[in-house]
Amino acid sequence: MGGKAAILIVLGFSMIFLVVGQNFSSLTTRAVDNYSGYYETTKAYDLAVSGANMAANQIFMDKTWDAGYQNLSFDGGIINVYVSNTEAGTGGKVLICHKPHGNPNAKVSIYVPTDAVSAHLAHGDYLGSCDGGTYNTQKAVIVSEGTYNGLTKVVTVELRPSNFAKFGNYYYTMSAYPATGDTFEGPFHVNGWLTTYGSPVFWGKATSAKGLRMLGQPKDPKFYGGYEDGVNIPMEFDTTGFRANADHIFYDTTGSNSKVDVKLYFNADGTLTYSQKIGAGSWSVSKTVNLSSFAPRGLIYVKGGNIYTKGTLNGKVTIVAAKSNIYGAGNVYFENDLVYNKDPRTFPTSTDMLGIVAEQNIRIQDNSDTRGKNIYTQASMYSQNGTIGPEDGLINQSYLGQWNILGGLTASNTRQTAIYDSHGNPIRGLKFVHRYDTRFLLSVPPYFPHTKNFEVVSWLE
């Protein structure tokens, strides 16, 4: 029995070692396969990311670039990059719905050269956009495919111009300083020195190109959203397309090259009451129209004139006052409060949205409706070459009120809104009370000015 038992034990252990050895060998093989697969996947991914970064850099340097890269050999693999760029135009290219190799669910609408269409159709792409649209939104799309050992990974990048409505406040320089009693919301940027007087309050992140200078007593600005210097955001506005896309253009129809003044009064029922005056002439008879019919694309343009406005906006629109080399033109004046029919702070689904664009200045007019009162303005405001603020009479009035803003301000320079004592406390005029319209982070008024260059808005891997 002892000998047989020993043989059985030996055979048993041999079987165990054989099974364990087989499992170990299988495990080792799978580990090698997994490592090889991981290596190939990583290489393909790195190739796709490299192609996307190279293309994005080209577009940052030249916003009209759309050449892409075809069968570019790199690090043992192949990079193909397709670029659709509305700034470059179609240039004879054909719009297709592209399904990347190995990742058909990542389909995207792109323009490709005519001689490349047949090859794309052969592997499952089809003519037209993926969603049936016309693909005319201003943007650039990069589709970068990295292929290694037959495995393809895809990176899709979308770039758009940066819209200045995203700022709560943006100034190229500052000659009037945020001071005690002033509060600001949303992103705040000055492309120079950020100079404060006393204890203004910044609820959003504040940035500047040159640094922070504190004046007055106490030298204690409140940066509840943080502060960062060394941030350079050039004031390179791109306002092209205003006149071409305007639903209605007011201009001098007499041919005398005279200034055109226009009254635009918004009504809570969704209508607009307007009239105009050319040169030294009389105001025309007021007309009331449905805003959505009068400006279906949401853009009203005054060429060589000024806009006088007030009321309650029910709808979405941008109004533009262009100087057009006419003396005294290019300004927007608030005759009274200008607010939304549905305040988005109370009605989160509100679609009321106003953009105000002036080639020169934006002013609260000094009149019987504004003097000695708090003022309410709800809009994103843009002054290309001037400042935004009250007229001198409201700054020097004996009354100390508030200018309550919901939206944003973008201007070449700041403007004083109040008179301060030696301690930095406002004593008359209008204290600046700003609330940022957070909708402008994702949505903006129609055709609102944007930067000339693109920035990455999405990166899909």
Image (cartoon, helix red, strand yellow):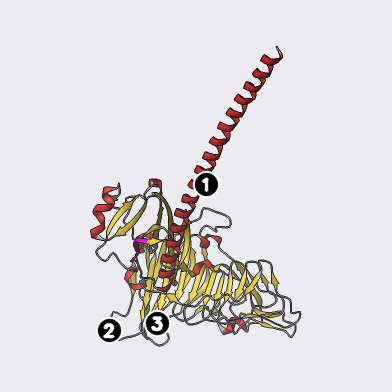
- Look at label 1 and name its amino acid: Tyr
Give the CA distance from mark 3 to mark 1: 66 Å
SS category of the residue bearing label 1? helix
SS category of the residue bearing label 2? loop
Q: Is residue 287 left or right of residue 225?
A: left
Asked whether 70 falls inside the magenta stretch, the response is yes
Residue in the foreground of this view, choosing between 92 and 389: 92
- Look at label 3 and name its amino acid: Lys
Residue 79 percent location from the top left of the image: 38, 59
Q: Nearer the viewer, mark 3 or mark 1?
A: 1
Q: Quadrant of residue 17?
A: top right
Q: Residue at x 55, y 59 (%)?
A: 343
Q: Residue at x 50, y 77 (%)?
A: 234
* First-in-chain label (3 vs 1): 1
Q: Residue at x 31, y 56 (%)?
A: 134
Give the CA distance from mark 3 to mark 2: 16 Å
Q: Quadrant of residue 62?
A: bottom left
Residue 299 percent location from the top left of the image: 38, 67
Q: Is residue 30 left or right of residue 136?
A: right
The reply to whether callout 3 and callout 1 are in contact (CB within 8 Å) is: no
Q: Which residue is mark 2?
A: 255
The disc label shown at residue 323, or none: 3
Q: Which residues are magenta?
A: 67-72
Q: Which residue is mark 1?
A: 35
Residue furthest bottom in the image: 327
